[in-house]
Image: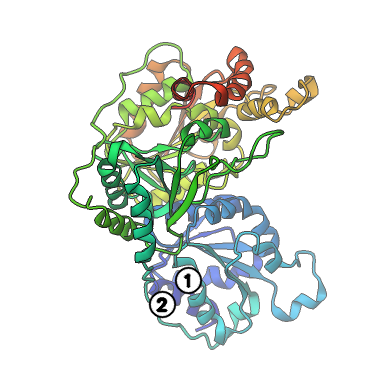
Amino acid sequence: MNGAQALLKTLADAGVEVCFSNPGTSEMHFVAALDGETRMRAVLCLFEGVATGAADGYARMAGKPAAVLLHLGCGLGNGLANLHNARKGKVPVLNIVGDHATWHVQYDAQLQSDIETVARNVSPGFVRTSQSTAALCQDAVDALVAARGLPGQVATLILPADVSWGEGGQPCPPPPAPTPPPAHEATVQAIAQAIRGSEKTVLLLGGQALREAALLDAARIAAHAPQGSVQLLAEVFPTRMERGAGLPFVERVAYLAEMAGVQLAGVRHLVLVDSKSPVSFFAYPGKASDLVPAGCTVHTLAAPEQDAAASLARLAQALGASGVQPPLQPAQRPDRPRGLLTAPKVCKAVGHLLPENAILIDEAITSGLMLNVMTAGCPRHDLLTLTGGAIGQGLPNAVGAAIACPDRPVIALIGDGTAMYTIQALWSMAREQLNVTAIVFNNASYSVLNVELDRVGAEEGGAKARAQLDLHGPVLNFAQLAQGMGVHAVRASTAEDFCTALEYALAQPGPHLIEALVPESLSGAKRKVLPWLLRSLPSLPPAVARALKKKVAP
């Protein structure tokens, strides 16, 4: 075997079944070796950000890493944004980056770059350049161990061309599965004691704590707590959250820091369960970045390297809550929407028609403000969100999720601005005939940035400033773009047409795109009032502040 052949056998033996690729000349021996490994599916992506985002979505749903094949430092640079999202989501990804032959590096050819330095931005825990064909497969096993452990991470293996084509490759046996420990008993008892004190407590759930078993134990703890003193919250952008009828309802921390402050007001104990202490997404003049309220003690039940579900089970047992029947979300759907199409009506239609066991991908930005409330009581589904805030994640995530779960419908709700970052994902959907329905909200605006222009305290934007946040002239036609890449697509401007299109897409195999022509969700008077409303929240009575928060961002 040459190095590439041995590498692919090592990966397949370890359960890596998919490689999302955007290769170049230095990766040709790896590409040629794909035909000799029948267990490896190769998925071509026309942009590196699609390949990395697809690997992210795949791993979230498959629970194990895929491989990504990228071309040199420039290809890695093109894929960094979605590797960043994977890193922030603690998602396992095996990131293979081809490089020049080791003896060619000295000549500083046109594509020569410092790949290791670029990679460390998204792979702080594992970056390695394989130095020989003999060492390559052990390097790959070490990378898989790093990627698959808790917390999951992006592990970057740099593959020089001569290491790939060199003879004498030796496959290595697969590494053992990781066995993360639960919380220490002393930690469990200390948190149990805090909960027994009946002070207002929030269990902030993230990562593995947002799956069924962990959610049920967290809900048992909340139901058993004295005087309803324990509340459940989920991190603002979950990696993967199981939700719907028959599961506990868990409200997410609000994106807007002022509204998150309303949710956390008066909390005396904040218990982190595979999550990080909440901070503001950005810095704003005169506002705190740390969202933990004054006088609140932060506890860590389960760090990212620990077993969150087992830790919650231990805490429930310590509190005598293991046998408690928690309140569960009843089955309910919104009515079928009618009239001129708006973003809330799109969310309502999704809730009305959402099929059983669907995968929802939310990168709708401001257009998705009503998605959570409209789908809370729908049939069981998984929700994937924008973990690292780097837009252009949703369509690639849909590619990976559909390949990981070919028997499940995937619905991706995408803003028009973010869709253009990785629009090439549509081509991969068509080529692979994936069961994905992409819903693109076309409001011809970077609407969230219009809101942020006011929130950061910038001067009133003039024509030049506003033009940077506006997508008119020309208005994009996503239906035509999708059709040009082989995806069935329609436009809808009424709720009736949208529902008909969604019903058709869910009934027919293969990829579909529905372009929803909608006005901005936050525009005109709403946008002008929002900054004033946010500034006033801390001074309002708590009940009024909570009601306003629920109205704006339920």
Residue under the image location 60 percent in, 41 percent down: 281
Q: Is residue 429 left or right of residue 23?
A: left
Q: Is residue 430 above or below residue 175?
A: above
- Mark linked to residue 144: 1
Q: Position of residue 211 (x, y in %)?
A: 33, 50
Amino acid type, callout 2: Pro
Q: Residue furthest right?
A: 107
Q: Nearer the viewer, residue 145 or 106?
A: 145
Quick one: label 2, few (<14), some, or many (20+) residues within 10 Å? some
Residue under the image location 56 percent in, 85 percent down: 135
Q: Position of residue 400 (x, y in %)?
A: 45, 51
Check if mark 2's residue and mark 1's residue have beta carbons within 8 Å: yes
Q: Quadrant of residue 27?
A: bottom right
Q: Is residue 448 above or below residue 431?
A: above
**Residue 398 visible in this rendered orientation of the protein:** no
Q: Position of residue 118 (x, y in %)?
A: 69, 62
**Residue 239 visible in this rendered orientation of the protein:** yes
Q: Quadrant of residue 475?
A: top right
Q: Secondary structure at mark 2?
A: loop
Residue under the image location 37 percent in, 64 percent down: 186
Residue under pointer 2: 175
Q: Secondary structure at mark 1?
A: helix
Residue under the image location 34 percent in, 65 percent down: 185
Q: Nearer the viewer, residue 355 or 193?
A: 193
Q: Is residue 123 left or right of residue 313?
A: right
